[in-house]
Image (spheres, rainbow, N blue to C red):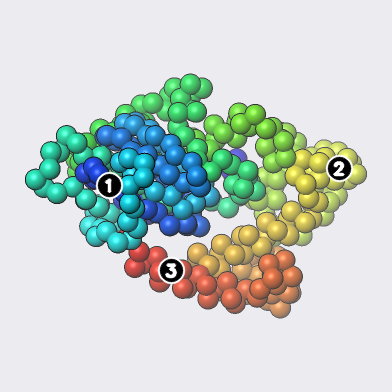
Amino acid sequence: MGMRLRGARYARLRLAPPFGIGFSAAAEARFHFIAAGNAFLQSQGQTVQLGCGDAVLLPRGDTHSLVSAPGLPVLPAESFEAKPLCGNICAVSLAPEETCRSKDVLIFSGRMEFELDTLHPLVGLMPRIMSVRDLLARQPEILPLLEAMEREMRTERAGSAGILARLADVVAASIVRGWVECGCGDSTGWIEALRDPQLSRVIAALHRDPGHNWTVAEMAAEMGCSRSVFAERFAAATGTTPLRYLAMLRMRLANQWLTRDRMAIDKVAKRLGYGSQAAFARAYKRLTGSPPGRARALGKTQLQQTSSAQL
C-alpha cells in the first residue's frame, strides 16, 4: 500500500571525465543508476561515491550534482543539449567522439512522482539520499534488475530506453518499500500506522473513497473498535485526528488534480464529495491558504516549463 512511483522524465547520460552536472530542486523524486564507471553524488553537504551497479533515490528532489571527482565545477543539467529518444526519454552525451569509450560514465537518470496515496506523509521522513545498497542484503532478488539495467545501458538495443524506464520505476519503488519495511530503525508515526493491519485498513479505505462523507464512527467500524479507541490509536500513530487527515488528503488530491491533471474545479469538488464548488473552494483556501484557481494557474505554468525542460 502506498508504494507506487510514476516516472515523469528520464535521461540516458554518457559522460567523459572530468565532468560535473547539476540538478536543480524539483517537486518530483530523483533517481540515478550507474551502468558504467564511477561518480560522486553531492547534495546538502553529503558526498556519496557511486560505482557500477549502484542506484540512488532522492525522494525530496533536493538540489544535487553528479561529478567525476569532488570539488569539480558543476554546470546545470538544463544547459546541455538533449536528444529525444522516445516518449519522455532523452539522451545527453558529454563525451567527445575522439575520447576513449571505455572511460565513459553511463548513467540512467529520472524524475519520478510519488502517486498520492498512503505513502505521501512518509516522504518528509525519508532520508535525503536512499541507496539500493541498503536493500540488496535483505532483498537479493533486486540484483537481476540492476544487472538488466546495466545490460540495456551498455548495448542500447532496440526498445532499451523504454525497458530502462520501467526497470527504473521498479528499482526505485523497491528502495522505498525496503525502507518502509525496515523502518530505518525508527518504527514510529506513519511507519507504525502502515504496519498496523487495523489502522492501515482504515487508511486504505479513506484513499479508495476520499469523496465519501466519512464519520469517525464509520472509520472505527472499519477498524472494528469503538470510536474512542480508534481516535486515540489513529492520533497516537499519525499525530493528527482522523477527520483532519481526511481533509488534508482531499486537499492533496485536489492540488494534484488541479496542477498536474488540469482538472476543472467543479469536477474536483464533485469528485471529493463537496456539495458545491463554493464549499470546496472555501475548504481548499482554509487548509492551503490560497484559492483553487491559483493552484490550477500554477499547474498551467509548470506544464509549460516542463514541456521546454530537457532533463
In which quarter of the view is residue 132 placed? top left
Residue 299: % across, % down: 50, 70
Q: Measuring 39% from the left and 34% from the top, which residue is drawn there?
A: 49
Kind of residue sitting beneath label 1: Phe
Give the left or right position of residue 100, taking residue 190 as reference: left
Residue lying at the far left of the rendered structure: 98
Residue matched to label 3: 303
Residue 287: % across, % down: 72, 66
**Secondary element type, mark 1:** loop
Q: Along the line of sight, which residue is nearer the eye, 58 or 190?
A: 58
Q: Are marks 3 and 1 in contact (CB under 8 Å)?
A: no
Residue matched to label 2: 232
Residue 126: % across, % down: 58, 42
Q: Measuring 63% from the left and 43% from the top, which residue is drawn there?
A: 125
Residue matched to label 1: 19
Q: Is residue 86 above or below residue 31?
A: below
In which quarter of the view is residue 289 placed? bottom right
Q: Are marks 2 and 1 in contact (CB under 8 Å)?
A: no
Q: CA distance from mark 2 to mark 1?
A: 54 Å
Q: Measuring 63% from the left and 32% from the top, which residue is drawn there?
A: 183
Marks 3 and 1, the one that precedes in the sequence? 1
